[in-house]
Image (cartoon, helix red, strand yellow):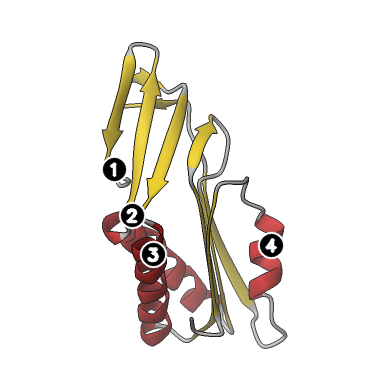
Amino acid sequence: MHPNINIEILSAPLELANCLAWVQSPTCGGIDVFIGTVRNATKGKQVEKLEFEAYLPMAIAEMEKIAMQAMEQWPVEKISIHHRTGILAVGEIPVIIAVAAAHRSAAFEACRYVIDTLKKTVPIWKKEFFADGAVWVAAHP
């Protein structure tokens, strides 16, 4: 893995402080962070919980590819991508992305690219649980 890329897929709760500490650098004046949280409703239905599953080797490889693409497109120095698996309650965090760059615009743009591309291409699946049943859905809206 590239020394300026940190990728983790964990079954334990994600820690924002870990991602921030990893990307911080004296050469970076901007850090952009995306934190995805489990919301309590989708498509007009109450969500009770979510479950995430991943094909780990492929998911990690795809996340690294996305991070490398972001580093090629924008002058960013460090990228951290952490994703959660397992069952998550409303309010819990399934994904954290932190991007550090010398300037904020690169960090903002690269962070958006990483989350948008991750949701489209990484083999992580989401199951939504409602009072009247559950359904597996794509990880993107």
Question: How many neighbours does mark 4 have within 10 angstroms: few (below 14), some (14-19), or many (20 or more)?
Answer: few
Question: Which mark identifies residue 57?
Answer: 3
* Label 2: element kind: helix
In this figure, which residue is indicated by the disc labeled 1? 141
Kind of residue at badge 1: Pro
Kind of residue at badge 4: Asn
Sequence order check, earlier mark of 4 and 1 = 4
**Figure quadrant of residue 28:** bottom right
Question: Which mark identifies residue 119?
Answer: 2
Q: Is residue 101 left or right of residue 108?
A: right
Sequence order check, earlier mark of 3 and 4 = 4
* Label 1: element kind: loop
Q: CA distance from mark 2 to mark 1?
A: 9 Å
In this figure, which residue is indicated by the disc labeled 4? 18
Sequence order check, earlier mark of 2 and 1 = 2
Mark closer to the observer (2, 1)? 2
Kind of residue at badge 3: Pro
* Label 4: element kind: helix
Q: CA distance from mark 4 to mark 1?
A: 27 Å
Q: Is residue 50 above or below residue 46?
A: below
Mark closer to the observer (3, 4)? 3
The answer to whether mark 2 and mark 1 are in CB contact below 8 A is yes
